[in-house]
Amino acid sequence: MPNQFPAVRPRRLRRSQTLRDMFQETEFSLKDLVLPIFVEEEIDDFVPITSMPGVMRIPESKLAGEIERYARAGIKSVMLFGVSHHLDATGSDAMREDGLVSRMVRISKDAAPDMVVMSDTCFCEYTSHGHCGVMHDHGVDNDATLINLGKQAVAAAAAGADFISPSAAMDGQVQAIRSALDGAGFIDTSIMAYSTKFASALYGPFREAGGSALTGDRKSYQMNPMNRREAIRESLLDEQEGADVLMVKPAGAYLDIIRDIRQASHLPLAAYQVSGEYAMIKFAAMAGAIDEARVVRESLGSIKRAGADMILTYFAMDLALQGI
């Protein structure tokens, strides 16, 4: 009589925690995570971001202590976002050697020299209109913005930034920044490009965090979330222009794009778990609907499984304190 039971039993490798750990295919650690932080000038105390429970704007005067705290916890890298009180039409403060961008980088590197410091390179938090570059005829002037991005990149590199991370979504921004850096002698400063950045509704809490003055949207320069082929093209263009690392932003709703770009490029690939993704997990956990710790690990694991080498996430410090 033939055996009616299955000969192939995948459950054999799931019988115990030891076996499950032994055969786990995807893992991540603190070295894979980048902590994005918001630094505000001219304030005396931390400012809670109500739409991102647990995240605060850090006073510039307390940044050094926070960077030291992150380093002690095991955080290896931070992405710096500034909240400026000196806004104008071009975001000129971001290009100054004594402006907020430069000061944040300098403070961070002085506090923890081994910390990998990434400088978000854009103008949305430094312009009075909230757009990512120079406005002309009711739109962002791509090429005029490229010149300014190069200036901001050089200022950040001079302050000690390890990575310039252009998020302005201008055509040709990587090439312009690479040219500016090399021309100023910063040939070893790396570029992590926000190479595939979607015009996503998931950025909502970030606007509160960064104090954005934007009215309208950025759909004329950020990508249509429904476009898959264009997403691959955007990242491959940045690779051709000299990017050292590519990025997909947001991450969780775009795992297919992460996989596509992973298969199309051999460059290191980052993915940004953005403010809305963070907020959804936090508020669901606060409502008792999910187990936060497990969902955080599952969500980050899925991003790594899709092909990301590194993940920017606001949960990085939580995980560090939990001893990931």
Image: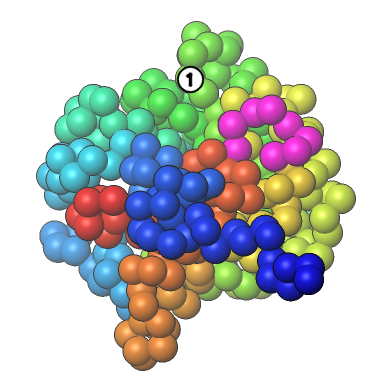
Considering the numbered disc 1 on the image, is that residue within a helix, a strand or a loop? loop
- Work out whether residue 133 can be spotted: no
Residue 52's spot in the image, x, y percent?
37, 72
In the rendered view, tell whether residue 267 sits above or below residue 8. above
User: Would you say 279 lies left or right of 89 here?
Assistant: left
Q: Residue at x 64, y 18 (%)?
A: 179
In the rendered view, tell whether residue 56 sits above or below residue 289. above
Q: Residues within 10 Å of mark 1 (few under 14, many from 20)?
A: many
How was this image coloured? rainbow
Residue 310's spot in the image, x, y percent?
49, 41
- Work out whether residue 76 can be spotted: yes
Residue 28's spot in the image, x, y percent?
43, 46
Amino acid carrying label 1: it is Thr
Q: Residue at x 31, y 36 (%)?
A: 76
The answer to if 264 sits in the magenta stretch is yes
Q: Which residue is mark 1?
A: 189
Q: Nearer the viewer, residue 316 or 93?
A: 316
Q: Which residues are magenta?
A: 262-269
